[in-house]
């Protein structure tokens, strides 16, 4: 009975908070997106002290199969405001880049994610994606 009850209690969870820091880490490796939500909010917080042009973090969501292609395009030349990425159809969702003490909200539409497809989230600040990544579970 408690398993059924807990499923009902968590059925309406349509947000998650993720912490990042100057240590180039997210505090979560998995984001569970409730597909029944009309909107799902990812609250990204940067607990560090360094500014975004030095140790900025964001959150990008793509299909896992596109990871190598998308991360190969990360470049300082694209600039901070674009999250160091060119405009690409493979990028499903992308938050702004934030620095120490800042936070942002990435609001996504779960219907743009297909059940059964593997998705990855990562930071597109140059050099960060190698360790700042995780899985999106639907």
Image: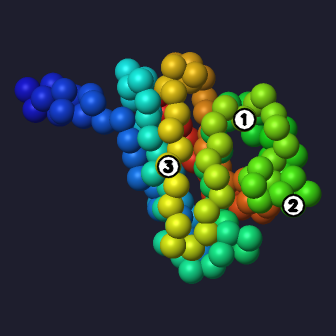
**Horizontal relation, residue 34 to residue 51: left or right:** left
Q: Answer with the quarter of the image where residue 120 lies.
A: top right
Q: Quadrant of the N terminus?
A: top left
Residue identifier under label 3:
105
SS class, disc 1 = loop
As drawn, the label of residue 28 is: none
The residue at 48%/33% (across/down) is 137
As drawn, the label of residue 91 is: 1
Camera-near label (3 vs 1) is 3
Q: Can residue 47 be seen in this view?
A: yes
Q: How is the image coloured?
A: rainbow
The residue at 87%/60% (across/down) is 76
Q: Marks 3 and 2, how far apart in space?
A: 23 Å
Q: Position of residue 41 (x, y in %)?
A: 44, 41
Q: In this view, does 70 lie above or below 98?
A: above
Residue identifier under label 2:
76
Using the image as rendered, state which of residue 89 and residue 96 is in the foreground: 96
Q: Which tag, 3 or 2, sits closer to the chain's start?
A: 2
Hey, which residue is sitting farthest left in the picture?
1
Q: Marks 3 and 1, how far apart in space?
A: 17 Å
Q: Which tag, 1 or 2, sits closer to the chain's start?
A: 2
Q: Where is residue 108 in the image (x, y as percent from the top left)?
A: 52, 34
Q: Can residue 64 be seen in this view?
A: no
Q: Position of residue 53 (x, y in %)?
A: 74, 70
Q: Marks 1 and 2, how far apart in space?
A: 17 Å
Q: Residues within 10 Å of mark 2 (few under 14, many from 20)?
A: few
Q: Which tag, 3 or 1, sits closer to the chain's start?
A: 1
SS class, disc 3 = strand
């Amino acid at each position: 009975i408690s398993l059924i009850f807990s499923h009902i209690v968590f059925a309406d969870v349509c947000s998650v908070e993720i912490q990042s820091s100057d240590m180039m880490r997210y505090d979560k490796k998995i984001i569970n997106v409730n597909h029944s939500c009309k909107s799902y909010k990812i609250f990204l917080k940067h607990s560090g002290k360094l500014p975004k042009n030095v140790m900025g973090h964001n959150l990008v969501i793509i299909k896992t199969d596109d990871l190598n292609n998308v991360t190969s395009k990360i470049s300082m030349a694209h600039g901070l405001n674009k999250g160091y990425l060119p405009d690409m159809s493979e990028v499903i969702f992308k938050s702004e880049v934030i620095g120490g003490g800042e936070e942002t909200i990435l609001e996504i539409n779960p219907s743009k994610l297909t059940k059964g497809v593997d998705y990855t989230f990562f930071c597109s600040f140059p050099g960060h994606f190698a360790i700042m990544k995780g899985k999106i579970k639907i």
